[in-house]
Image (cartoon, rainbow, N blue to C red):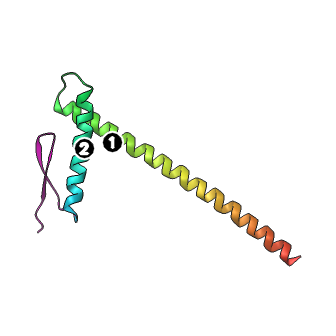
Amino acid sequence: MTKSIEVDVYGQKLALRPIEDESYAHELARYVEGQMQIITRGATATTPLKVAILAAMNIADQLFRQERRRQAGEAEVERRAEGLLECIDSHLELDRS
């Protein structure tokens, strides 16, 4: 069995399930830590649990916004591809005439 990966987030040692790339696990931990630090900079005395929940909300917001952008980009690519196919079809029809 593969050994878990230990990371530190906001003063908490966490044992993560094995990930192929240990440096990736540490990168994730640094990102979460950074999000939590952003929350604590703008907050008055708050509990670590509240900081973690607010950081999770911010990360979820980033994820949802990125997914919306991806979907919009995908729809745009599909729209353009359909336009190109229509253009090709019309040119092929003209060549046949």
CA distance for labels 2 and 1: 8 Å
Q: Quadrant of the C terminus?
A: bottom right
- Mark 2 or mark 1: name the one nearer the start of the chain: 2
Residue 80 location, quadrant: bottom right
Amino acid type indicated by mark 1: Ile
> In this picture, which residue range is highlighted in magenta?
1-19
Residue at image position (55%, 49%) is: 72
Q: Name the outermost residue toward the bottom.
A: 96
User: What is the x, y in percent for residue 22?
Assistant: 19, 61
User: Is 29 included in the stretch rendered in magenta?
Assistant: no
| 77 left or right, relative to 30 | right
User: What is the x, y in percent for residue 18?
Assistant: 17, 62
Q: Is residue 55 above or below residue 23?
A: above
The 10 Å Cα crowd at callout 2, few under 14, some 14 to 19, many 20 or more, is some
Q: Which element type, helix, strand or loop, lies under badge 1?
A: helix
Q: Is residue 88 above or below residue 60?
A: below
Q: Are marks 2 and 1 in contact (CB under 8 Å)?
A: yes
Amino acid type indicated by mark 2: Val
Q: Is residue 39 above or below residue 86?
A: above
| 86 left or right, relative to 23 | right
Q: Which residue is mark 1?
A: 59
Q: Is residue 48 above or below residue 24?
A: above
The 10 Å Cα crowd at callout 1, few under 14, some 14 to 19, many 20 or more, is some
Q: Which mark is residue 23?
A: none
Residue at image position (64%, 62%) is: 81
Q: Which residue is mark 2?
A: 32
Residue at image position (74%, 69%) is: 88
User: Is 18 included in the stretch rendered in magenta?
Assistant: yes
